[in-house]
Amino acid sequence: MVENIWGNNQNERVANYFDNVVKDGSLNQTLVIQNIIDTHIGEEIKVPSGTYLIDYLNIPNGTHLR
Protein backbone atom coordinates (compact mmCIF):
# COMPACT_ATOMS: atom_id res chain seq x y z
CA MET A 1 0.00 0.00 0.00
CA VAL A 2 1.29 3.46 -0.92
CA GLU A 3 1.01 6.09 1.80
CA ASN A 4 0.13 9.50 0.42
CA ILE A 5 2.34 11.97 2.26
CA TRP A 6 0.90 14.94 0.39
CA GLY A 7 -2.47 16.13 1.60
CA ASN A 8 -2.43 14.88 5.16
CA ASN A 9 -0.85 16.14 8.38
CA GLN A 10 2.64 15.56 6.97
CA ASN A 11 1.99 18.03 4.12
CA GLU A 12 4.04 20.81 5.70
CA ARG A 13 6.96 18.49 6.51
CA VAL A 14 7.28 17.31 2.89
CA ALA A 15 6.66 20.76 1.42
CA ASN A 16 9.47 22.07 3.62
CA TYR A 17 11.89 19.58 2.05
CA PHE A 18 11.16 21.02 -1.38
CA ASP A 19 11.40 24.62 -0.15
CA ASN A 20 15.20 24.26 -0.30
CA VAL A 21 15.22 22.69 -3.77
CA VAL A 22 16.09 25.04 -6.65
CA LYS A 23 13.20 24.75 -9.12
CA ASP A 24 14.49 26.92 -11.98
CA GLY A 25 16.96 24.48 -13.56
CA SER A 26 20.00 26.58 -12.68
CA LEU A 27 21.61 24.26 -10.11
CA ASN A 28 22.01 20.48 -9.99
CA GLN A 29 19.59 19.16 -7.37
CA THR A 30 20.24 15.42 -7.72
CA LEU A 31 21.57 14.90 -4.19
CA VAL A 32 18.88 17.00 -2.51
CA ILE A 33 16.02 15.25 -4.30
CA GLN A 34 17.59 11.79 -3.82
CA ASN A 35 17.77 12.49 -0.10
CA ILE A 36 14.05 13.32 -0.05
CA ILE A 37 13.28 10.09 -1.89
CA ASP A 38 15.53 8.04 0.40
CA THR A 39 13.76 9.36 3.50
CA HIS A 40 10.31 8.47 2.08
CA ILE A 41 10.81 4.99 0.60
CA GLY A 42 7.49 3.30 -0.12
CA GLU A 43 5.53 6.53 -0.09
CA GLU A 44 3.96 8.82 -2.67
CA ILE A 45 5.89 12.07 -3.00
CA LYS A 46 4.30 15.05 -4.72
CA VAL A 47 6.99 17.07 -6.43
CA PRO A 48 6.08 20.76 -6.77
CA SER A 49 6.03 22.08 -10.32
CA GLY A 50 9.27 23.54 -11.59
CA THR A 51 12.33 22.76 -13.68
CA TYR A 52 14.76 20.49 -11.85
CA LEU A 53 18.34 19.87 -12.98
CA ILE A 54 19.16 16.25 -12.07
CA ASP A 55 21.58 13.60 -13.32
CA TYR A 56 19.98 10.36 -12.15
CA LEU A 57 17.51 9.37 -9.44
CA ASN A 58 17.19 5.95 -7.82
CA ILE A 59 13.49 5.49 -7.12
CA PRO A 60 12.91 2.32 -5.06
CA ASN A 61 9.99 -0.02 -5.76
CA GLY A 62 6.84 1.22 -4.06
CA THR A 63 7.96 4.84 -4.08
CA HIS A 64 6.02 7.13 -6.41
CA LEU A 65 6.78 10.66 -7.58
CA ARG A 66 3.76 12.68 -8.64
Image (cartoon, helix red, strand yellow):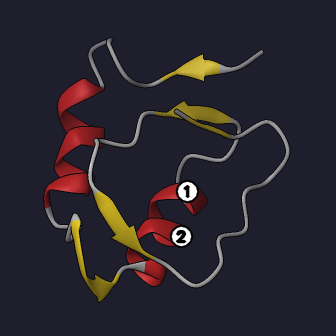
* 20 on left or right of 36: left
State the SS at label 2. helix
- Looking at the picture, how far across and down is residue 48, in whole percent? 29, 41
- List the single residue furthest toward the right: 61
Give the quarter of the image for residue 17.
bottom left
* 19 on left or right of 39: left
- Marking on residue 51: none
Q: Amino acid at mark 2?
A: Gln
Q: Amino acid at mark 1?
A: Ile
State the SS at label 1. helix
- Marking on residue 37: 1
The structure residue drawn at horizontal position 42% and vertical position 34%, both measured from the top left corner, is 46
Q: Nearer the viewer, residue 30 or 2?
A: 30
Q: Badge 2 is on which residue?
A: 34
Question: In the picture shown, does residue 43 fall above or below 6?
Answer: below
Packing grade of label 2 (10 A; few <14, some 14-19, many >=20) is: some
Give the quarter of the image for residue 28.
bottom left
* 16 on left or right of 45: left
The structure residue drawn at horizontal position 60% and vertical position 19%, both measured from the top left corner, is 3
Packing grade of label 1 (10 A; few <14, some 14-19, many >=20) is: many
The structure residue drawn at horizontal position 66% and vertical position 47%, both measured from the top left corner, is 41
Question: In the picture shown, does residue 52 fall above or below 50?
Answer: below
- Looking at the picture, how far across and down is residue 53, in whole percent? 40, 78
Instruction: Give the tally of numbered discs.
Output: 2
* 8 on left or right of 23: right
- Looking at the picture, how far across and down is residue 65, in whole percent? 57, 40
Placement of the N terminus among the 4 image quadrants = top right
Distance, label 1 to label 2, CA atoms, is 5 Å
Q: Nearer the viewer, residue 47 or 26?
A: 26
User: Pointer 1 and pointer 2: residues touching (CB < 8 Å)?
Assistant: yes
The structure residue drawn at horizontal position 85% and vertical position 45%, both measured from the top left corner, is 61
- Looking at the picture, how far across and down is residue 15, in whole percent? 22, 40
